[in-house]
Image (tube, rainbow, N blue to C red):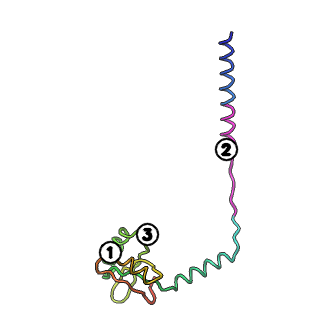
Amino acid sequence: MQSNNYVILNHMKNTCLFIVIAFSAIICSAQQGNVNIQQDNKITQLLNIYKDINENTNYYRIQVGFGSHQEAQNLKAKVDLDFPDWPTKIDFESPSYRVRIGNFRTLLEGERKLIEVRQKYPSAMLLKPEKTTN
């Protein structure tokens, strides 16, 4: 008799546990919603001002090399692998394409990075271009 009660109690526990788990799963999977973000127009204006200022700011950059368009593309691909966290850009200055990396705000920062770059590209040089092309 005692063993039969134990089996019944154990069966009831398992059944209750199954019901609780099933009910929780139904409730969790039924949760859906939409997120509606309302942003003040002044934030967009500030972001545009920030972008304009950064586009027109002259940064110190490191010129890694130059050549034909294809040579510049090949060099840029190598530089992107060597320095993946730095912005890389190809600028056209007649008659050649120049591969430049980085946007360094100060001369000191640029000189420190130049030491690092020269380990892979010995002819690299630090410069502050007047205006770069897109």
Q: Is residue 105 magenta?
A: no
Name the mark nearer the viewer: 2 or 3: 3
Horizontal and vertical percent for residue 49? 61, 82
- Please give the name of the residue rendered at 40% of the width and 83% of the height, measured from the top-left corner: 91
- Front residue (pair 49, 122): 122
Q: Is residue 29 magenta?
A: yes
- Front residue (pair 34, 40): 40
The CA distance from mark 2 to mark 1 is: 52 Å
Q: Which residue in the rendered view is the most extreme toward the left? A: 122
Instruction: Give the residue type at disc 1.
Output: Leu
- Please give the name of the residue rendered at 67% of the width and 26% of the height, measured from the top-left corner: 15
Instruction: Give the residue type at disc 2.
Output: Cys
Name the mark nearer the viewer: 3 or 1: 3
Which numbered tag is attached to residue 75? 1
Q: Is residue 61 left or right of residue 20?
A: left
Residue under label 2, please give it: 28
Horizontal and vertical percent for residue 42? 69, 77
Residue under label 3, please give it: 85
Q: Secondary structure at mark 1?
A: helix
Q: Which residues are magenta?
A: 18-36
Instruction: Give the residue type at disc 3.
Output: Asp
Q: Quadrant of the N terminus?
A: top right
